[in-house]
Image (spheres, grey):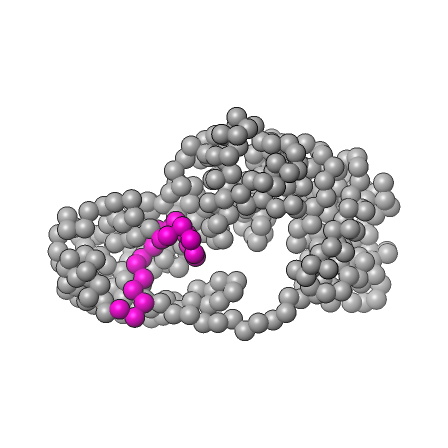
Amino acid sequence: MSDFAERLLDWFDEHGRKDLPWQQPKEAYRIWVSEVMLQQTQVQTVIPYFERFTARFPDVVTLADAAQDDVLQHWSGLGYYARARNLHRAAQVIRDTYAGEFPRTLDEVIDLPGVGRSTAGAILSLAFDQHHTILDGNVKRVLARHQAIEGWPGRTAVAKQLWDIAEQYTPAENTAAYTQAIMDLGATLCTRSTPACERCPVAADCKAHNSGSVTEYPGRKPKKSKPLRATTMVIAKHNGRVYLERRPEAGIWGGLWSLPEIGSADVHDWCQETLASGPEDVETWQLLRHSFSHYDLDIRPIVVRVVAPLSKVADSDDATWHRIGDKPPGGVAAPVNKLIERLIDGTHD
C-alpha cells in the first residue's frame, strides 16, 4: 500500500464521513442512486432528495416498475434530468437482465445507462469492496494538487495522467474505505476555493501546497462566453387550473411537464390553435432568467385567462389541465415551478 493511501486511511478512521444516509445499510442500489445524484450536485443538497427518493423507490425493482412521471417528480429540483431518466432505464435493465440483482463486474455496470468508468468503480468499490479506481471531481482536485498536474482535467491527456496516478494510489485492500476517504478529503478539506491544507493528511508532500499554488490546480476549463437565448411561455389558466404539456424526451427538461413555449408566435393564435379558445385577459410578467451550464435562458411569461370549457382540450399523456396547488403530474423544471408557484401566491381563477 502506498504511503499516500496509508495516511489517507489513517485520517479517514478519525475524520471520515461514516453516517451518510446511503452508507447504512450498505447496499449497491442505495450507493448507485447516491452516486448518480452526486454527479454535479453537493452532498448536503442531495441528502433530502436521496431520502425522499429511496423512501418512494426502496429497491431497484420498485424503481424499474414505476412510471417515468413518478421518477421525475421525485427528482424535481435536482436538475440534470437525464440522470433520472437514465437511472430509471438502468433499473429496468437490472430488473430484466440481472433478475433485479445489481451487476458485479465493471463492464456490466459501465454498460448501464448513465454510468461511466468512475461511477461504476465507486459503486463496486463501496458496495462490494472490489478493487477499482475512481476519478470524480473531488479526486481530480486532490490528485491534481498533490502532483501539480497542470491543465484542465477535461482534456484527454490531463485525464489520463490523473487516472494513472489514481490507479497507482488505490490500494488492493480496503479499497472501499480508501474510495470514501479520498472523496471525503476533496469534499471537506481539499475544497476548490478555501482548502484547509493545515489539516490535510497528505499536505507534507503535496506539490501545490509546498509551492504555494494550491488554488491554481486543477486547471480551469477554458472560458467561453455564455450565449443568451429567449423564449415565451404561456401560462393558460381556467377555473383554478393551468395548462401543462409534456416536453419531448430529447433536449432540455426531457420528459418533464412544462408550460408551453410559443417562441415568437402570437399568443392569441396559439390559444385558438391549441385550446380552441381566445384569451379573455392577457398579462405579461417580468422576464425570468434561468442559467444552464452552457447558456442562459430568458423566459417571458404571458398569463392568459381562457374562457372556453376545458372539455375542448381533453387530458392526455402529453397535455393536462393541472389544478393549481395540487401535486404536479410528474417532474417539473425549476423555472416552470417558480411560475406556477407565483400563480399559487397570487390571484387565479
Residue at the image point whose x is 27% and y is 60% from the top: 235
Residue 22 visible here: no
Q: Residue furthest bottom?
A: 225
Q: Quadrant of residue 159?
A: bottom right
Asked if one can make out residue 79 in the rendered structure from this viewpoint, the answer is: yes
Q: Which residues are magenta?
A: 247-265
Q: Residue furthest left?
A: 308
- Per the picture, the main secondary structure of the magenta-coloured stretch is loop
Q: Image check: 69 left or right of 322?
A: right
Q: Position of residue 37 (x, y in %)?
A: 55, 46
- Identify the residue at image location x=80%, y=46%: 169
> Is 250 a magenta residue?
yes
Total marks in image: 0
Quadrant of the drawing holding the C terminus: bottom left
What residue sits 85% from the left and 40% below the top?
A: 1
Q: Position of residue 187 (x, y in %)?
A: 67, 52
Percent coordinates x, y for residue 106 in the rendering: 66, 38
Q: Compared to 58, does 270 lie above or below?
A: below
Asked if residue 263 is among those painted magenta in the image, a careful observer would answer yes
Where is residue 221 shown, x and y percent of the image? 64, 66
Residue at the (58%, 48%) spot, across then down: 38
Tell whether 80 sits left or right of 236: right
Residue 83 against residue 106 in the figure, above or below: below
Q: Within the image, what quadrant is residue 181 found in?
A: top right
Q: Is residue 276 left or right of residue 227?
A: left
Please state which of residues 236 and 89 is positioned toward the viewer in this rendering: 89
